[in-house]
Image: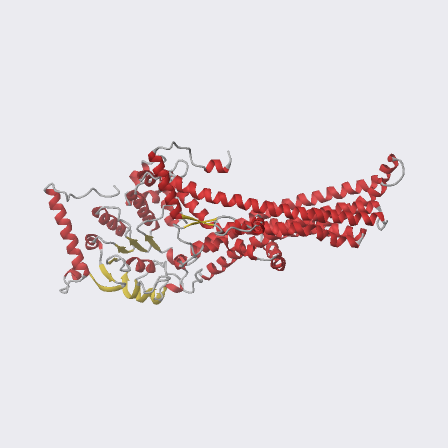
């Protein structure tokens, strides 16, 4: 079955319903996909040129997909190669070769030295082998009987065999060095990305385009692998061409320029084909991204239930098929243009080769060169042609991969500037008071500060509540306290020491931050809890933390208990409910046992009684607690001091009684009474059998 047949729609009977559906589909297709084709009838010369041009390939734009301003991050290398001339490639080659070899030497210097020496020896062996070929041909072309000719050629044949074997051995060892260097280079570059992404300040992930540059860096991280391959091919080609030039020059210097004459047409075709590939690749980037998005919707476990609930199978398959057909049509036209260009290049090159052999024949006819030397020249020219073609392809590949590697290097440079500076102030094991003094913070790209001029004090052993409506900056303040962000202005101090001057990881090790969602790591249940403090392994403490969070009972009921993988996409893995996942998140916080515990709405999937029970258990573990919650009855039951945030500012603070006694009312008093009245109304309705019954606890 061909690709076209595989993408073609299934045949259907032409019922009125089918016809209507087809008309609607075509109408929808016309609305979402526009074909851009020449509007005027081209001349005969124009039609001939179109056979060789990628610009004549039909182009289809997907109008319902918003243009991605960062798509150039992915395709920049291809676009620049498409526009670059051969000479721009050539000028950059020395720098790229040095960069590749320096990167490889960072993994194993002796392997790189061995590889270079072997390439040099390979060229020498090839040159000596070609010179020995002259001796063989000279012996075979003499007028003596055949046995005598073979005897005379035998020493040269032995030399050819020895040099060929040596060349093959050098090539094999070179391939071994390359195969050992390539994966090491990839692993080192990808590990560096992982190291930087986990070490940069959190603000990096708020920057526009961060994920696009990180994705481009991942593509560029494997470029050294391909750059090394291209470099080895270029060095091998140089060795072969160098040996051929040496031999041809020895035979007759007049033949040297003829080698280039035979390669120019194929070089033109190779460069043209490469540019057409790049241009169409750039043009199809949006359509390919759309196909991948549709495929992900249909194949992901996260959206499988929604796809079936909305009966989207025909919708997704139809859109996938339509866009795929458009891309296929472009690729077929592209292949036609590339094939025609290659045919033209090969034809002209064939004529040039014929001209070379005519010149060589004239030199032999006029006895300018011996017959044996002419035969050697023919072999050398053939080798040079093949090697030059390989070098041209490798140079294009090295140039393109070098641009991707530039993206990797730029990302590393940018990420390194966002890695926190080493701490200059020691991190205390505990504190008597945390003071926040006139702290303001603005998110990347925001016009106004999220938090402004915030000041508060947290005393050791206190339970402090941060309350306010959505968007009041409660989570922002919590992340600043947890050293997720650094304040733009103001200071956060532990017993007078500025936390901005402390080693971030050491400071965070004293803090247990329990967020609302909590990461769902694809680890076992035990490991999901242990990462709260991965530096220690304490199974009893893990189970104790799970029991304190109310997670021990359901974990032991999982297929493999604490050894159950918490990801259904993995073999023998499983998923748990939102409430159960939240309890694992709470257990992770219990296991960490931080000096400062920041609980940012970690109990939103639990009922009110379970939330109060959680904070009481957390308090019994010791430490100081900052709680962020919308349930003010939990604040009343647990908090020693309350800070009210409104529009990014702390508008009031005090105990529950003090805030409720405020004669001016205020957000806290009004919200608390509103929640209490709502709960009372629902409870009364439930007692009377009305529709306002109290729901069962979530996550239970």
Please state the horizontal and vertical placement of residue 512, each as a whole percent of the image: 34, 53
| Quadrant of the snapshot with the C terminus | top left
Instruction: Give the side of residue 697 with respect to residue 32, left or right.
Output: left
Q: Residue furthest top?
A: 13
- The percent position of residue 92, horizontal first and vertical second, equals 61, 59
Colour mapping used in the image: secondary structure
The answer to whether residue 248 of the structure is visible from this angle is: yes
Q: Residue at x 30, y 42 (%)?
A: 580
Residue beneath the point at 46% across and 52% down: 215
- Residue 457: x, y in percent? 27, 64
Residue at x 43% of width, y 65% of height: 424
- Residue closer to the observer: 34 or 564: 34
117 vs 146, left or right, is: left
Marker count (numbered): 0
Q: Is residue 507 left or right of residue 374?
A: left
Whether residue 185 is visible here, answered yes or no, is no
Q: Is residue 467 left or right of residue 45?
A: left
Residue 461 in percent (x, y) is at: 27, 57
Which image quarter: residue 674? Answer: bottom left
Task: Give 301 or 429, whichever is nearer the viewer.
Answer: 301
Viewer-side residue, 466 vs 363:
363
Question: Compared to 339, does 594 lie above or below?
Answer: below
Q: Residue furthest right?
A: 144
Residue 87 occupies quadrant: bottom right
């Amino acid at each position: 079955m061909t690709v076209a047949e595989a993408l073609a729609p299934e045949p259907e009977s032409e019922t009125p319903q089918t016809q209507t559906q087809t008309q609607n589909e075509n109408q929808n297709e016309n609305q979402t996909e526009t074909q851009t084709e020449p509007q005027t009838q081209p001349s005969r010369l124009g039609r001939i040129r179109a056979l060789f041009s990628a610009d004549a390939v039909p182009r289809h734009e997907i109008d319902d997909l918003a243009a991605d301003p960062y798509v150039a991050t992915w395709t920049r290398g291809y676009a620049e190669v498409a526009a670059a001339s051969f000479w721009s490639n050539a000028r950059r080659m020395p720098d790229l070769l040095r960069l590749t070899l320096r990167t490889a030497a960072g993994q194993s210097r002796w392997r790189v030295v061995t590889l270079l020496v072997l390439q040099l020896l390979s060229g020498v062996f090839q040159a000596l082998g070609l010179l020995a070929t002259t001796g063989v041909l000279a012996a075979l072309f003499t007028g003596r009987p055949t046995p005598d000719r073979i005897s005379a050629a035998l020493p040269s044949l032995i030399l050819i065999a020895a040099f060929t074997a040596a060349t093959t051995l050098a090539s094999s060892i070179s391939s071994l060095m390359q195969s050992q260097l390539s994966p090491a280079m990839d692993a080192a570059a990808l590990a560096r990305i992982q190291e930087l992404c986990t070490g940069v300040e959190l603000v990096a992930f708020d920057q526009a385009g961060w994920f696009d540059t990180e994705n481009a860096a991942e593509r560029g991280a494997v470029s050294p692998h391909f750059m090394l391959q291209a470099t080895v091919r270029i060095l091998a080609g140089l060795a072969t061409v160098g040996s051929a030039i040496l031999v041809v020059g020895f035979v007759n210097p007049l033949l040297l320029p003829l080698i280039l004459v035979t390669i120019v047409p194929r070089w033109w075709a190779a460069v043209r084909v490469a540019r057409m590939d790049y241009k169409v690749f750039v043009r199809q980037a949006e359509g390919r991204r759309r196909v991948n998005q549709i495929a992900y919707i249909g194949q992901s476990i996260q959206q499988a239930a929604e796809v079936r609930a909305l009966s989207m199978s025909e919708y997704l398959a139809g859109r996938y098929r339509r866009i795929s057909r458009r891309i296929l049509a472009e690729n077929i036209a592209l292949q036609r243009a590339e094939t025609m260009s290659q045919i033209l290049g090969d034809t002209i090159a064939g004529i040039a080769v014929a001209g070379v052999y005519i010149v060589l024949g004239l030199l032999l006819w006029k006895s300018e060169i011996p017959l044996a030397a002419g035969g050697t020249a023919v072999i050398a020219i053939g080798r040079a042609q093949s090697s030059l073609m390989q070098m041209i392809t490798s140079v294009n590949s090295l140039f393109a991969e070098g641009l991707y590697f530039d993206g990797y290097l730029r990302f590393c440079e940018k990420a390194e500037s966002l890695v926190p500076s080493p701490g200059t102030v020691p991190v205390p094991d505990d504190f008597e008071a945390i003071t926040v003094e006139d702290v303001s913070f603005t998110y990347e790209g925001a016009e106004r500060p999220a938090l402004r001029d915030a000041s508060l004090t947290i005393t050791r052993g206190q339970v402090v509540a941060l309350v306010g409506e959505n968007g009041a900056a409660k989570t922002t303040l919590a992340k600043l306290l947890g050293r997720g962000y650094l304040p733009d202005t103001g200071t956060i101090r532990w017993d007078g020491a500025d936390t901005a001057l402390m080693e971030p990881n050491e400071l965070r090790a004293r803090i247990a931050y329990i967020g609302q969602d909590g990461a769902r790591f694809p680890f076992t249940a035990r490991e999901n809890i242990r990462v709260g403090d991965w530096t220690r392994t304490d199974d009893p403490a893990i189970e104790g933390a799970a029991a304190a969070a109310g997670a021990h009972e359901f974990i032991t009921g999982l297929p493999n208990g604490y050894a159950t993988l918490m990801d259904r996409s993995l073999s023998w893995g499983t998923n748990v409910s939102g409430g159960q996942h939240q309890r694992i998140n709470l257990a992770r916080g219990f296991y960490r046992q931080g000096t400062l515990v920041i609980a940012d709405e970690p109990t939103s999937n639990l009922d009110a009684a379970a939330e109060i029970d959680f904070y009481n258990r957390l308090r019994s573990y010791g430490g100081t607690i900052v709680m962020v919650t919308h349930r003010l009855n939990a604040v009343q039951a647990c908090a020693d001091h309350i800070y009210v945030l409104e529009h990014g500012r702390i508008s009031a603070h005090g105990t529950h009684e003090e805030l409720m006694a405020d004669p001016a009312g205020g957000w806290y008093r009004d919200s608390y009474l509103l929640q209490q009245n709502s709960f009372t109304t629902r409870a009364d309705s439930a007692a009377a059998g009305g529709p306002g019954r109290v729901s069962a606890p979530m996550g239970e």
